Amino acid sequence: MASPLRGGLFGEIVSMALVTLREHKLRSGLTVLGIAIGIMSIVGMTSLIRGLDKSLRESILAMGSDTIMVAKFGGFSLGSGRELTELLRRPNLTPDDAEAIASQAPSLASVNIVLGQGGPPTRERVYYRSERSKLLNVFGSTANYAEVFHIDVVAGRFFTPGETRRRAPVIVLGQTPVQALFPNLDPIGRRVRLGQARYTVIGVLGPTPSPGGFNMGQDDLVVIPHTSYQKQFGIRAERMFGGEMRAVMIAAIPRDDVDRDVALADIERVMRIRHRLRLDEANDFELMTQDAILALWAQISGAIFLTLIVVSSIALMVGGIGVMAIMTISVTERTREIGTRRALGAKRKEILWQFLLEASFLTAVGGVIGILLGSGIGVGVHFATGFPISLPWWVFALGIGFSASVGIMFGLFPAIKASNLDPIEALRHE
């Protein structure tokens, strides 16, 4: 007999909640709106953060697990609490550092230097006849750039060590300048102008993977020999916060038969000797690997997600207070109804569940609306900008769970108040 009673009571509660929504449209609408805004922010921002997280993780994985990056400083130094001014006073990396690592670290198979990366970028337009590209990142590199960064050359070739030594005016284009300047032409062998200097196109890089389809300008680049880069641009130094920053980064790949930790130790040894560091002095440079970058990003994304939850919880709390106020007013307005139900034999537990489930129903409606709006925002941003999104099933469960929890938490006080009303006093209420 208990089960039919619960089923009938539940149906009656749902019916009462619908009547409440219909009779008090503005009041109930504001209650639903407060919850919907909180859930919308959770679902919408979670979909964008999850999409960005997935995209960046796949981009970092594409770098290759064996690639070791050497930089003046990076996210690890900043994350450890170091002052930016202190980091900027570190010595800048130079092409001589790359040459020393290549010659003095026997565990490495390949060493590459990139000028224009790892600091203030060098940006120029590329011109071909009457056409011009957008501003592009200009990188000066050694001949093994494509090998170290795992990028395919889909047309032509990359420049050779001999061309690097001769400061040859040769250039390899990314996909963005190729599509802008040579939509229906073979670019190989064409003469283009980079800033004020002339170069011959000898190769085209394949499209850089863009997980999630989000274009972050990863193909907006051209690569020239680092000697040609120094001839045209020098090694630019930017004054920042009392220090100097040069856009120089070194990348290395260990030999197949060498453990990566051995290669890391080799690079560290060479750099410490070049920078004349004593045994008790910390490194004044930074070594980065794929798993270390992933671990750093996990910390950052976790902090972002926690901040999102805190901010969204404030909106849900405001909505919850609205639920409590609305349900308290509802208890006052329906005091005679409660007295009548108690006089006809309704138990306190049934009155408690009536108002508790009514509050949960109201917030669940807000939760469903918030989920739809949040998903719509994520999808809209994706189609408008290409920003990657991710909408796993648990995001929807999280939205429904949060909204129902708010209803139970903030509906509990008015529900208890209603269940504790004295039937006789309730029937006398005007």
Image: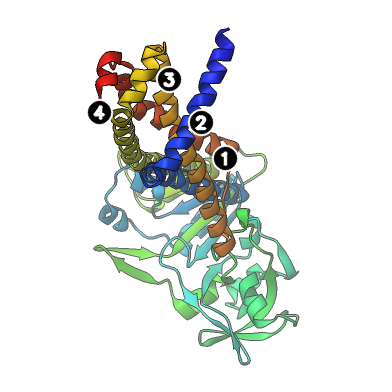
Label 3 crowd (10 A; few <14 / some 14-19 / many >=20): some
Spatial distance from mark 3 to mark 2, Cα to Cα?
A: 14 Å
Q: Are marks 1 and 2 in contact (CB under 8 Å)?
A: no
Residue at the spot of label 3: 353
Measured from the top left, where is residue 116 in percent x and y? Answer: 47, 67
Helix, strand or loop at label 4? It is loop
Measured from the top left, where is residue 186 in percent x and y? Answer: 75, 80
Measured from the top left, where is residue 146 in percent x and y? Answer: 65, 61
Q: Are marks 4 and 2 in contact (CB under 8 Å)?
A: no
Spatial distance from mark 3 to mark 1, Cα to Cα?
A: 62 Å
Q: Which mark is residue 430?
A: 4
Looking at the image, which is closer to me, 259 or 101?
259
Spatial distance from mark 1 to mark 4, Cα to Cα?
A: 81 Å
Residue at the spot of label 2: 15
Say which label, 3 or 2, has the lower sequence index: 2
Label 4 crowd (10 A; few <14 / some 14-19 / many >=20): few
Residue 347 vs residue 426: left or right? right
Label 1 crowd (10 A; few <14 / some 14-19 / many >=20): many
